[in-house]
Amino acid sequence: MDVLRDRNALYRVAADGSIENAYTLKLINKTPQAQRYRVEVVDEHSHAIDGLRILGGDMQVTAAPEQVLSLIVTLSADPANAHGRRNVRFVITGIDRPDVHAQQDTRFFGPLP
């Protein structure tokens, strides 16, 4: 898995006032079978992050055998919890094969206080 931040803007303010960051996740299924994966975001200690979520809710994807997926993922934070820079970690876990696991660290940016 690779995680690429949207380089056009550090963050954007949504209509409801929440702060959003966009990412592209590149997932590679290196197996000869289709695989289902769960995508989650946690802090650098693998704990849930209060006030930060994947826009659209829990994310599950299916990759065909040997397929490379490019997923656009938007993280959204309550403006009260979105100041400055935060370390975040994307975690990919196999749904049918929990032993399949990948993680990648990145950052979430918001306005300076």
Image (cartoon, rainbow, N blue to C red):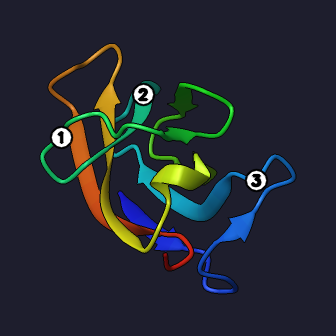
Label 1 crowding class (10 Å Cα cut-off): few <14, some 14-19, many 20+?
A: some
Residue 69 in the image, given as x and y percentages of width and height? 56, 50
The amino acid beneath tag 2 is: Arg
Q: Single out the residue that lies furthest toward the right.
A: 15
Q: Residue at x 64, y 59 (%)?
A: 20
* Eye-nearest disc, 2 or 1: 1
Kindly identify the amino acid type of the residue bearing the numbered disc 3: Gly
Question: Residue at 60% of width from left, 63% of height from top?
Answer: 21
Reading the image, the residue beneath label 2 is 38
Q: Alpha-carbon neighbours of circle 3 within 10 Å: few (<14), some, or many (≥20)?
A: few
* Mark drawn on residue 17: 3
Label 3 and label 1: CA atoms lie apart by 27 Å
Classify residue 32 by image quadrant: top left
Q: Which mark is residue 31?
A: none
Q: What residue does disc 1 label?
A: 46
Gap in angstroms between the C-alphas marked 2 and 1: 15 Å
Q: Marks 3 and 2, Cα distance to the nearest angstrom?
A: 28 Å
Q: Secondary structure at mark 1?
A: loop
Residue 9 left/right relative to 65? right
Horizontally, residue 46 falls left or right of residue 86, namely left
Q: In the image, is residue 63 above or below residue 67?
A: above
> Which residue occupies 54% across, 25% down?
58
Q: Contact, CB < 8 Å: mark 3 with mark 1?
A: no
